Every structure is written in C-alpha cells, then in structure tokens.
Image: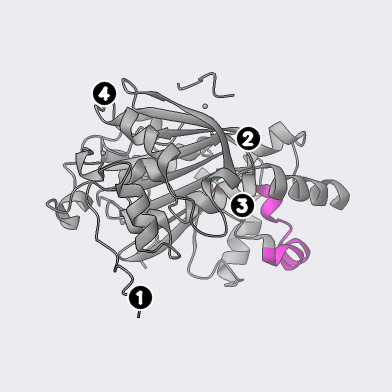
Amino acid sequence: MRPTRAVAVLLAVGLALSGCGGNDESKKDRAEPTPTAIPKDLQLPESSPVHDPRRVLALVPADAEVLTLTDYDEIRERLGYPDLTSDDLMTDRTAFWERADKDAVMLTDGLLRDQHSRLWLDYGFTQDDVDWEARFTGPDGSGYVLGFRPDQDMGEVVKAVKDDVAPLEDATVLAEQHLVVSGIADEGDPVWASDPTLMDLPAVGAESSYVHRGCIPVNEALGPDADFEDQDALTSKYDVRGLMPLDAFSVNFDDATATARTDRDRADLLARKDLIDVWPEVGSITWQDGFEGMPVADPSSGRIGWRVRNPVAAANLVLTDHLPFAVCNEMVPLDEPTGL
C-alpha cells in the first residue's frame, strides 16, 4: 500500500454517444506511459471540495490497472433523493439504498455502509454523506477515495480516522478537498490524470464508471466455466487475431444506458461491437442477463453503446470482465476433451 499523500495538482441508446495491447508490449511499458501535464478539469482544487469524481485520476497511481467510480450524488438525483444526508429520516435513507441496490449499476458497494450505526452514533456521519467513491487496484495493492458532501463537517471524519475506526484504518483526510484517501500516489509520482490513454475514459456525469488499463484476455472474458467447446464456438465465428491492440477502455453507466469508451478512430470498433453478438453464453450470469438491445458503435469517437436490462447483473458482468468488445488479439487454447 502506498503512503496516502495528496498530489498537488490534480452518457436510451439513441445514441447519446457523447486498444488489448498485444503481449509484445510489456506490462512495464503500459504502466509507465509518457506523462503529460494534468488537464485543468482533472486537477484537484487547492482549497475546495471535489465535486467531479473524474478528478480522482489525479490521485490514482500510474501503475494501477482498474478503477471503479460510483457517483452516489447522481444516483440520488435520479432516484428522487437529491439532497439525502445522514440528517434525514432513517426511513428515507433505507428506502434510497433499497432502490439503489436494485435500480442502479453501483460498481462500489459503499465502503462505510457496514459500519453505518457505529459511525453515526460515535462520529455523526455515514455513507449517506459520501457523494462519490472510487476504488483502484494495481501491482502495489489497492486504494480508495471517498468524496464527502460539500457541507460535511470534516472534523468528524478526522476524529474517526484518528481513532482507526474500521474501515478507515491507515486512511488520510484531505479536509479542504473533503476527501478521505488510502493508497494514492505519492506526491510528484505519475498518475492516471497525466496519461493521455486514460484521462478521457471516465464520462462526465456518469452514475458509475469502470476504467481498465489494457485488454482482457479472451479466456478471462469467457469466464472460469468456459471450456474448449466455448472457445471453439467463438473462434468458428471470429478470429480475434484480426483485432487491433487495445491499451485501455471504460464502461460508463447513466440510468439504463451503458457506453464503452476506447481510443478515437478505431478501425476495429465495429468488429469489437459485433463480438458482443457472437460471444458464447457461459456461466451463471450472461450478457443477456445484464444487457439488451442491439449495440451501436461510433468508430470516430471510439464508443459503443447498449442498454441495461438488469443493473445488478450488469455490474457483475463488468466487475468480472465479461466484456467481449474489450478482449485481447490473441488467445491461449484450452485443452480439448480426450474422451477418457
């Protein structure tokens, strides 16, 4: 786990559409892109709360591999609880979470929810005071960032962190930015916000976003239950070796719409979109369980859009990398049954 110090500078389908690096490129090269200046819209403010969850990219270490964002403020607005906080009636707060757990694609479960009662009784805040939440993982471990509401008394949060209350052990409070952080980049180290491949992948105003560095190995996208027959069913319809490399991608959710983002002007984007239709249905939760409708692609902007059927299943598919459009352009053959 990295030390938690602040970095100084830091989308239905109608379609509101606002590359799997080959293994010839080493993981080290992908994890250490040529950095650029952090765009102004991704820089952390010096002394005011962080309203835009995308600004978390200025805190995510450059070698992180996956980032998930959930904007609870956007979800509260859509579900009819726009100003919900810990000061509201428990019936309203419970009703919101029951709706959100069922009707929103939440890619983070709410770090503070399991300690709701203790945090409220002892410190006066809960998950209901968190506007957005980010989680990231990488070779050096995992980390998180909680963005609290602008009028939250951060002194209460500081006290909880000083008391090492679970799950805030080893966290750091950036009081002026209304953030609680853990595992973020060291000050001055490269971050996702300075990587041109990653900086435009989270969508403005999305309820949740999944950002992934690199492509997904074909067998991982097929799932752990896939066998030789499933792999053969895929290869008989499409040869993934014809795909271009994919350095990074995202999936952004807004109500019942999902939008994948890749790099612009991709010659293989239509082929990647078509992979969704030919992908073998493997496992207890399949693409058809989570999503519906015909995907629509815009190669010029590098986006693919489709509709959400079941938000809970959709979140499961994304978090387990069951994403056909994002596979790598090579495949490790699975063993063929011997019949013995």
Separation of marks 2 and 4 at Cα, in angstroms = 30 Å
Distance from disc 1 to disc 4, alpha carbons, whole Å, reads 46 Å
Residue at 34% from the left image edge and 22% from the top image edge: 301
Dots 3 and 2: beta carbons under 8 Å?
A: no
How far is mark 3 from mark 1, CA to CA?
64 Å
Q: Are marks 1 and 4 in contact (CB under 8 Å)?
A: no
Decide which of 222, 132 is in the foreground and name it.
222
Q: Residue at x 46, y 22 (%)?
A: 17
Q: Which mark is residue 154?
A: 3
Q: Earlier in the sequence, mark 2 or mark 4?
A: 2
For numbered disc 3, what is the local secondary structure?
helix
Q: Position of residue 148 (x, y in %)?
A: 60, 47
Q: Give the CA separation, mark 3 to mark 2.
A: 22 Å
Residue stretch rendered in magenta on the structure? 114-134
Q: Is residue 182 visible?
A: no
Viewer-side residue, 76 vs 156 = 76
Please tell me whether residue 310 belongs to the stretch shown in magenta.
Answer: no
The residue under label 4 is 265
Q: Nearer the viewer, mark 4 or mark 3?
A: 4
Can you say whether 148 is above or below 77 in the image?
below
Within the magenta stretch, is there residue 123? yes
Examine the rendered structure and indicate whether residue 23 appears above or below residue 85.
below
The residue pinned by badge 2 equals: 74
Q: In the image, which disc is placed on residue 339?
A: 1
Dot 2: within a 10 Å radius of its alpha carbon, few (fewer than 14), some, or many (20 or more) residues? some
Q: CA distance from mark 4 to mark 3?
A: 44 Å
The kind of secondary structure element at disc 2 is helix
Q: If you read the primary sequence from the N terminus, does the residue marked by circle 1 or circle 4 appear first?
A: 4
Question: In the rendered view of the protein, which quadrant contains the C terminus?
Answer: bottom left
Q: Amino acid at mark 1?
A: Gly
User: Where 76 sits versus 174, above or below?
Assistant: above
Q: Nearer the viewer, mark 3 or mark 1?
A: 1
